[in-house]
Image (cartoon, rainbow, N blue to C red):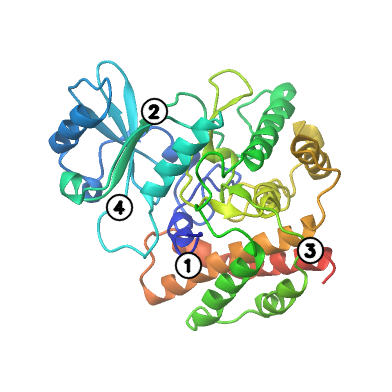
C-alpha cells in the first residue's frame, strides 16, 4: 500500500500553519489549540470499559483504573491518552464511519513501529494491536506514551538561538538513519512495492487531479503532468519512507536536542529515500501558506542551517557524495502536495470536505501549483 487519498483528510485540518499571530491563515486553530488533551469528542467516544478489559488481557503490566482523554490537533486517526495510576499509554484507532479503502491503516502503523524498534530507531513501543471491531467499534493499537516536546513551528521559536543548529542536526541524522534501516532484516520486505516509486506516484496523483472536474484544471499542473515523467532520475533506491517527516511529527527530549520518537507513520511505505528527504526539506522552500515553512525567514538571524548546508549534512549522514535529482524530487513533492490540495478543493466545492479549514486549503491551490512549477523550472524544465 502507498499513500493516497487519505492524505487529504490529514490536510483538511491545520497541522500548525504559521502566520504572524500563530494562527492558521484563514482559520482559527492556533499552535496552542493543538497542544495537550481534552475530553473525548462526541463523535470519537467508545466503550471505555471494554477497552480496559481488553488491555487487562493483552497489555503486559496494565493495571487500572483507566482514564481516557483525547489529544487535540488534526490527526486523521483519533489519538487518545490512556491514564492509569502506574503509567500512561497512547491509543491510535481508525475513525468511526465509512472510510476510504486503504486509509487509516492502524495495523500498518503498529507493524512499522514494531519493526523499526528492532532497528533501534526512535519510535514508541507498541504494546498491542486489536483488529476486532467488537471491542470499541474500530481497529486500534496501544503504544508507549513518550514524554517530550513537539515543535509545531519550523523556525523553532521556543528553542534558544544558540541551540537551533543541534535540533536541525538531530532531524537530519534521524531521517538519514531511517533510510539506512535494512527493511528486509526487520521484516518489512513486503511493506510496499519496491521500485518505480516516482513513476507510480506521479501516475497516481496525475490521475486523481485529472479526474476531479469540479476542482478544475491549472496550467502549471498540466505542464507538470507532462514534464515529471520525462525527468525521473536514473537509478533505483528503496528504503522505508515516512511520508510526512516534519518537525511536528516527532517528539524531542524534554530538554535536549534529541529525538526520542518519530510519530504518525500512516503514510509510510517502501519508497525512494530521495523523495522522503526532499519532502522533509520542502520546509526551506515552503512559505507559511499551508504548513510551517522557512521560505522568507531570515535563517542567519534565526541561526538555522541553510538548505545547502542541510542537504550536505544529509549526504554525510547517509554516506553519499551528492544527491542527484534533488531539485526534481522537490518538484515532485510540490506537485504531490498541490494535487492533494486540489482534491481538497474539489471536496470543498462538492460540500464533502471534512473540516472547515478546507476552504483556506482550497484557496491556496493556485499559489501552490505555481510554486510546484517553479521547482520544475529550477530542476531544468
Numbered tag placed on residue 95 in the rendering: 4
Q: Residue at x 45, y 47 (%)?
A: 29
- Specify whether residue 161 is in view: yes
Q: Of the residues tagged 4 and 3, which is closer to the observer? A: 3
Of pointers 4 and 2, the one earlier in the residue sequence: 4
Q: Is residue 235 above or below residue 63?
A: below
Numbered tag placed on residue 144 in the rendering: 2
Of pointers 4 and 3, the one earlier in the residue sequence: 4
From mark 1 to mark 2, how far is it between C-alphas?
33 Å
- Horizontal and vertical percent position of residue 372: 70, 65
Q: Is residue 354 above or below residue 45?
A: below
Of pointers 1 and 2, the one earlier in the residue sequence: 2
| Residue extending farthest bottom | 213
Q: Quadrant of residue 259?
A: top right
Q: Secondary structure at mark 4?
A: loop
Q: Residue at x 43, y 70 (%)?
A: 348
- Would you name the residue on which mark 1 appears? 344
Residue 169 vs residue 128, the one in the foreground: 128
User: Is disc 1 in contact with disc 3, using a CB cutoff of under 8 Å?
Assistant: no
Q: Of the residues tagged 4 and 2, which is closer to the observer? A: 2
Query: Which image quarter is the C terminus in?
Result: bottom right
- Horizontal and vertical percent position of residue 27: 47, 54
Numbered tag placed on residue 234 in the rendering: 3
| Residue extending farthest front | 185
Amino acid at each position: 500500500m502507498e499513500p493516497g487519498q487519505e492524505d487529504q483528510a490529514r490536510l483538511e485540518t491545520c497541522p500548525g500553519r504559521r502566520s504572524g499571530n500563530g494562527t492558521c491563515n484563514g482559520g482559527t486553530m492556533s499552535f496552542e489549540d493543538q497542544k495537550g488533551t481534552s475530553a473525548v469528542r462526541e463523535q470519537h467516544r467508545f466503550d471505555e470499559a471494554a477497552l480496559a478489559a481488553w488491555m487487562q488481557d493483552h497489555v503486559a503490566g496494565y493495571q487500572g483504573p483507566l482514564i481516557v482523554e483525547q489529544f487535540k490537533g488534526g490527526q486523521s486517526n483519533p489519538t487518545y491518552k490512556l491514564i492509569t495510576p502506574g503509567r500512561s499509554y497512547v491509543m491510535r484507532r481508525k475513525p468511526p464511519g465509512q472510510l476510504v479503502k486503504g486509509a487509516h491503516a492502524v495495523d500498518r502503523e503498529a507493524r512499522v513501529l514494531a519493526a523499526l524498534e528492532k532497528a533501534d530507531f526512535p519510535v514508541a513501543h507498541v504494546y498491542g494491536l486489536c483488529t476486532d471491531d467488537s471491542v470499541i467499534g474500530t481497529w486500534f493499537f496501544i503504544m508507549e506514551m513518550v514524554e517530550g516536546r513537539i515543535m509545531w513551528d519550523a523556525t523553532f521559536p521556543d528553542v534558544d538561538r544558540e541551540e537551533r543548529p543541534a535540533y536541525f542536526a538531530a532531524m537530519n541524522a534521524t531521517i538519514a538513519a531511517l533510510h539506512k534501516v535494512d527493511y528486509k532484516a526487520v521484516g518489512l520486505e513486503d511493506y510496499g512495492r519496491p521500485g518505480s516509486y516516482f513513476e507510480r506516484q506521479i501516475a497516481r496523483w496525475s490521475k486523481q487531479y485529472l479526474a476531479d472536474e469540479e476542482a478544475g484544471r491549472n496550467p502549471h499542473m498540466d505542464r507538470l503532468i507532462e514534464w515529471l515523467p520525462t525527468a525521473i532520475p536514473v537509478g533505483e533506491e528503496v528504503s522505508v519512507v515516512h511520508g510526512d517527516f516534519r518537525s511536528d511529527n516527532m517528539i524531542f527530549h524534554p530538554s535536549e536536542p534529541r529525538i526520542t520518537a518519530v510519530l504518525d507513520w500512516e503514510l509510510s511505505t517502501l519508497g525512494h529515500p530521495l523523495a522522503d528527504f526532499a519532502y522533509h526539506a520542502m520546509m526551506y522552500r515552503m512559505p507559511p501558506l499551508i504548513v510551517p515553512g522557512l521560505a522568507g525567514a531570515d535563517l542567519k538571524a534565526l541561526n538555522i542551517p541553510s538548505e545547502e548546508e542541510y542537504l550536505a549534512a544529509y549526504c554525510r549522514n547517509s554516506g553519499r557524495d551528492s544527491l542527484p535529482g534533488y531539485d526534481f524530487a522537490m518538484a515532485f513533492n510540490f506537485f504531490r502536495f498541490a494535487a492533494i490540495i486540489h482534491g481538497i478543493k474539489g471536496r470543498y466545492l462538492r460540500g464533502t470536505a471534512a473540516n472547515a479549514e478546507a476552504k483556506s486549503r482550497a484557496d491556496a491551490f493556485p499559489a501552490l501549483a505555481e510554486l510546484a512549477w517553479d521547482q520544475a523550472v529550477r530542476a531544468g524544465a
